[in-house]
Image (tube, grey):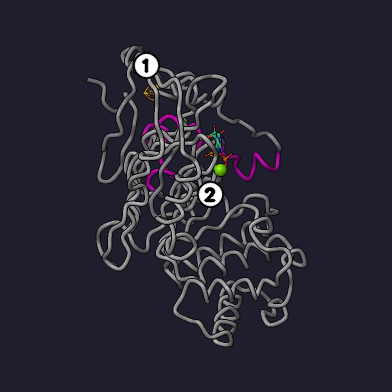
């Protein structure tokens, strides 16, 4: 295993401008993450916390006008470092009034052309992505085998059809599709949801990417299929060893598959570190938000007795109207008298509390 991250996201900000509110939705607001070769980094957080927008930003797929992005996304492949956000600012102009952005002009066609140029040879090749709904991402009119074969011919050194077909069959077998030779000729709508997700995983891996991004790969599948896909991803982690950014709101999935975890809320990382340490910790060893997330996972007994549903109280933060202080303040149950004013008025930084374990909370840095 080489040292140094393959993917290094630094101070990523992805904002969507609302003309009606004359303000930005700060969907991702200064996120830094690093992914080392062979490791799986999980991103967990409630709905709307910015997980998918982070992934889409890496893929150059934030196309909505007028979404803007700043920061660095460094991708290192074959020893070559590339910033996927290089020069992106050239295509956006912000007009400010008293330090507040009041208008954003974006040259969308040129922005798009620039992104496509930067992402050529990266998207689908160096970085592959699997989504929640595999059927939507596949061509409904072409057989799944042919789609994988074409991806192989496009993204790898194999340019011989017969060889690409054999390679596609290899990947279908690798993701445990039963009767791969028969399934090869099926169109996506002829397959079940779980089977389709396996095909999608095969397609993503077939281009032998440096990084795989999996955004809610098990959400939307029924419980038994979910656990089978989690087992498959676990097996692939040891057999293929692909470097993975795994997004899920399911803590158990993250705990099973990730080496490290980043907990996101309101567009920011509130805690990051070793997955097992953080997701198995007691209430006072993690960020209050993580503790609340962990407390909201129902136990097997609670599920049986239907006495769970202790979701975190209060509404998820509105990333258009952000408070001055800690983003979790309005819902936090751990604020003490001593730190209350800091929590309310000053946003804490993400700071290390133990080796590789960082927390953004005044409780840990009461001065
Ligand atoms: N194209 C877009 N235009 C405007 N706002 C957007 C767009 N895409 C996402 N957002 C906003 O960005 C914020 C973060 O959304 P995101 O999809 O990243 O959340 P998430 O953490 O992936 O949630 P979920 O668990 O529901 O998938 C939300 O406020 C969302 O409404
Ligand atoms: S900084 Fe304060 S409000 Fe924020 S999570 Fe920590 S204790 Fe809670
Ligand atoms: Mg999402």
Q: What stretch is highlighted in magenta?
A: 276-305
Residue 233 in the image: x percent, y percent? 53, 63
Q: In which quarter of the image is residue 1?
A: bottom left
Residue 249 in the image: x percent, y percent? 55, 43
Q: Is mark 1 within 8 Å of ligand 2?
A: yes
* Residue 59's disc number: none
Q: Mark 1 points at which residue?
A: 336
**Of 291 and 134, the residue lying toward us:** 134
Label 2: few (<14), some or many (≥20) within 10 Å? some
Can residue 273 be seen in the rendering of this structure?
no
Q: Main SS type for the magenta part? A: helix
Identified at 49% across, 47% down, the residue is: 56
Residue 141 in the image: x percent, y percent? 73, 66
Q: Residue 298 lies in magenta, yes or no?
A: yes
For the C terminus, the image quarter is top left
Label 1: few (<14), some or many (≥20) within 10 Å? few
Q: Name the residue under label 2.
A: 252
Identified at 41% across, 47% down, the residue is: 261
Quadrant for ligand 1 reads top right
SS of the residue under disc 2? helix
Can residue 171 be seen in the rendering of this structure?
yes
**Looking at the image, is mark 2 or mark 1 earlier in the sequence?**
2
């Amino acid at each position: 295993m080489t040292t140094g991250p393959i993917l290094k996201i630094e101070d990523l900000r992805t904002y969507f401008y609302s003309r009606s509110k004359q303000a930005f939705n700060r969907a991702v607001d200064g996120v830094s993450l690093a992914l080392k070769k062979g490791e799986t980094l999980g991103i967990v957080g409630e709905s709307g916390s910015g997980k998918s927008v982070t992934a889409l930003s890496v893929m150059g797929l934030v196309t909505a006008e007028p979404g803007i992005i700043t920061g660095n996304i460094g991708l290192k492949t074959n020893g070559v470092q590339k910033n996927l956000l290089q020069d992106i600012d050239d295509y956006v102009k912000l007009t400010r009034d008293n330090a507040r952005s009041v208008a954003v002009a974006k040259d969308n066609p040129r922005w798009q052309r620039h992104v496509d140029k930067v992402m050529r040879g990266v998207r689908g090749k160096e970085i592959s992505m699997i989504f929640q709904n595999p059927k939507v991402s596949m061509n409904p009119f072409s057989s799944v085998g042919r789609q994988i074969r074409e991806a192989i011919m496009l993204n790898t050194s194999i340019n011989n059809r017969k060889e690409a077909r054999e390679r596609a069959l290899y990947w279908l077998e690798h993701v445990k599709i039963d009767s791969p030779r028969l399934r090869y000729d099926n169109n996506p709508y002829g397959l079940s949801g779980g089977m389709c997700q396996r095909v999608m995983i095969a397609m993503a891996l077939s281009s032998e990417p440096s990084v795989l991004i999996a955004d809610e790969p098990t959400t939307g599948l029924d419980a038994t299929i979910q656990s089978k896909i989690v087992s498959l991803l676990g097996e692939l982690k040891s057999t293929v060893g692909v470097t993975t950014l795994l997004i899920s709101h399911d803590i158990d999935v993250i705990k099973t598959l990730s080496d490290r975890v980043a907990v996101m809320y309101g567009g920011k990382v509130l805690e990051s570190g070793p997955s097992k340490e953080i997701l198995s910790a007691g209430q006072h060893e993690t960020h209050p938000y993580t503790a609340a997330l962990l407390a909201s996972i129902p136990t097997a007994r609670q599920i049986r007795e239907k006495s769970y549903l202790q979701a975190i109280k209060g509404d998820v933060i509105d990333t258009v109207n952000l408070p001055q202080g800690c983003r979790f303040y309005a819902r936090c149950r751990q604020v003490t008298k001593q730190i209350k004013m800091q929590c309310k008025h000053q946003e804490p930084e993400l700071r290390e509390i133990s080796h590789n374990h960082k927390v953004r909370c005044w409780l840990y840095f009461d001065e």
